[in-house]
Amino acid sequence: VLRFTNVSDNGNNLYLDNININDLAIQPPIANFNISDNRPCKNDPIEVTSLSAGTFLDYTWEWDEFVVASTEVGVGPHNIFYFVEGPKTITMTIENELGSDFVSKDLEVIFFPENDFTYQNQGLNTVAFFAEEPEGSGVSYSWDFGDGSMGSGANPVHTYANEDTYVVTLVVTNKCASLQSVQTIMSIASSVNDLNELDLSIRPQPNNGNFEIVFDERYSDIYFEILDVNGRVIKSERKLNPNSTIPIDIQDVTPGLYMLKVISSDKTSLMKIIKE
């Protein structure tokens, strides 16, 4: 009950202006909240908890896109997860009779690491490797070079003892997953002798991309590959009961050094092709 009394002794007129009546038990809103993980993996649950000050509060949450959340209101805590990676923003707005306040916080939803890699022969049996996943926070790389040697880092360089083919394995790990990639590569040293168990020759050598594989013996089953200096196969074919010569056309490739690998039964020939 409110009672107003005129104490001015200037008559009985009483004038009242706007009067605000506040409940002293209500405290003004001050918005704040906590995110249990600021770098969650895609599809991993996170908990969002209000740390706000104030009383008799109403809560509204904005979760950003690509999220699964049970509700957008209430004090929480709220358990949510994002199903698309990338930067996200969570905004909380609180209000009561004394006003409103809001706060926004950013997080980064991270993804499974890329596990592919490329490589480049640098001569003298030295190979440079390049992981597809760039170096960054929380990413590790484990390399098995296929010759008993191990390595780490996104872009290692390894020198092999011999020119040969090797099975190289890369394992890329972050907090979300550990993924493996395997490739068969060829290390090339231009100074080493050709391996020629099949008694064949390349004519002419050098050439313009048109040449013949010439066999000194007859073979019933021949498989051959032509590889670039990075070990990538640019042409392959299998021949049953081939003639003594097999014509080859690689005129569409750039000039440089290539490798011819020919296999028949348990014999292998590995020879250089010099395209001018």
Image (tube, helix red, strand yellow):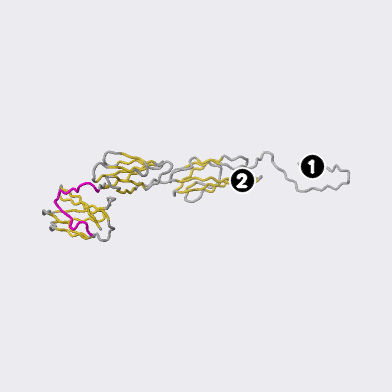
Of marks 1 and 2, the one in the foreground:
2
- Whether the magenta-drawn stretch holds residue 192 is answered as yes
Taking depth in this image into account, of 154 and 34 the one nearest to the observer is 154
| Segment tinted magenta in the rendering | 190-207
Rendered-image quadrant of the C terminus: bottom left
Mark 2, secondary structure of its residue: strand
Which residue is outermost to the left? 217
Based on the displayed image, in which of its 4 quarters is residue 273 positioned?
Answer: bottom left
**Residue 191 relative to residue 21: left or right:** left
**Residue 77 relative to residue 129: left or right:** right
- The residue sitting at 20% across, 51% down in the picture is 271
Q: Which mark is residue 3?
A: 1
CB under 8 Å between discs 1 and 2: no
| Residue 151 x %, y % | 33, 40
Taking depth in this image into account, of 175 and 79 the one nearest to the observer is 175
| Residue designated by label 2 | 101
